[in-house]
Image (spheres, rainbow, N blue to C red):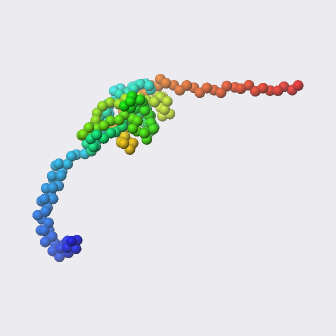
């Protein structure tokens, strides 16, 4: 059949063109029908925080909206809040999970975060609770930090929210206790007789 098409193209191009002519309107119609009936695929993942200033032990409420039209209804995801200094990816902070327990990793066990399940349309909206971790080595004391929300898949791959990170001012109230200094030890000297 390939040889027939190539031979027809060489010997009688007009015959090939007119032979395909009745099929062209059907192809165009099929393509237009596909464009009209195709469901647009989009993903929207946004968040809003309830305040801009907190202490390092204070909980922050985050309202999250997810619209994943390309998701199968009933899919589960896990949400995480992350504080960090501008210009870094040194994330820290706790996300309160469905059991009410603050969790801050390891994120290879992302199923310990706050679990959500999208509806049949791929939508979910609700709130999560997060708080800084004043004992994290990435917490640099009082100051401005950026905050964003991530969504983990079952395989613990993360996608960050479409919303721009927001600035949260964190006031330090927990201070590391100073390390005790070594005490001097007495050394006994023997005196000559």
Q: Going 25% across and 42% down the picture, which residue do you hit?
A: 69
Q: Going 30% across and 37% down the picture, which residue do you hit?
A: 117
Instruction: In this rendered view, identify the residue nearer to me: 9 or 67.
Output: 67
Q: Going 15% across and 52% down the picture, which residue do you hit?
A: 33
Image quarter of the C terminus? top right
User: To which quarter of the image does residue 131 belong?
Assistant: top left
Which residue occupies the extreme right position in the image?
Answer: 193
Q: Position of residue 16 (x, y in %)?
A: 15, 70
Which residue occupies the extreme bottom position in the image?
Answer: 11
Q: Going 36% across and 42% down the picture, which residue do you hit?
A: 153
Instruction: In this rendered view, identify the residue nearer to me: 5 or 87.
Output: 5
User: To which quarter of the image does residue 30 belong?
Assistant: bottom left
Tell me if 69 is positioned left or right of 112 in this view.
left
Tell me if 188 is positioned left or right of 39 in this view.
right
Q: Is residue 142 above or below residue 110?
A: above
Q: Position of residue 102 (x, y in %)?
A: 42, 30
Tell me if 86 is positioned left or right of 4 in this view.
right
User: To which quarter of the image does residue 60 belong?
Assistant: top left
Q: Position of residue 40 (x, y in %)?
A: 22, 46
């Amino acid at each position: 059949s390939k040889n027939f098409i190539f031979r027809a193209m060489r010997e009688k191009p007009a015959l090939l063109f007119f032979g395909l002519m009745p099929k062209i309107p059907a192809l165009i119609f099929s393509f237009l029908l596909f464009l009209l009936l195709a469901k647009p695929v989009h993903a929207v993942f946004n968040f809003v925080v309830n305040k801009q200033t907190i202490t390092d032990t204070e909980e922050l409420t985050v309202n999250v909206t997810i619209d994943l039209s390309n998701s199968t209804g009933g899919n589960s995801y896990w949400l995480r809040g992350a504080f960090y200094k501008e210009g870094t990816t040194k994330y820290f902070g706790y996300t309160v999970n469905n059991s009410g327990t603050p969790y801050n990793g390891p994120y290879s066990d992302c199923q310990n975060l706050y679990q959500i399940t999208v509806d049949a349309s791929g939508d979910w909206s609700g709130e999560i609770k997060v708080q800084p971790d004043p004992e994290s080595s990435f917490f640099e004391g009082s100051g401005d930090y950026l905050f964003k929300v991530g969504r983990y898949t079952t395989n613990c791959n993360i996608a960050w929210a479409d919303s721009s990170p927001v600035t949260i001012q964190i006031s330090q109230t927990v201070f590391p206790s100073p390390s005790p200094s070594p005490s001097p030890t007495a050394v006994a000297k023997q005196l000559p007789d």
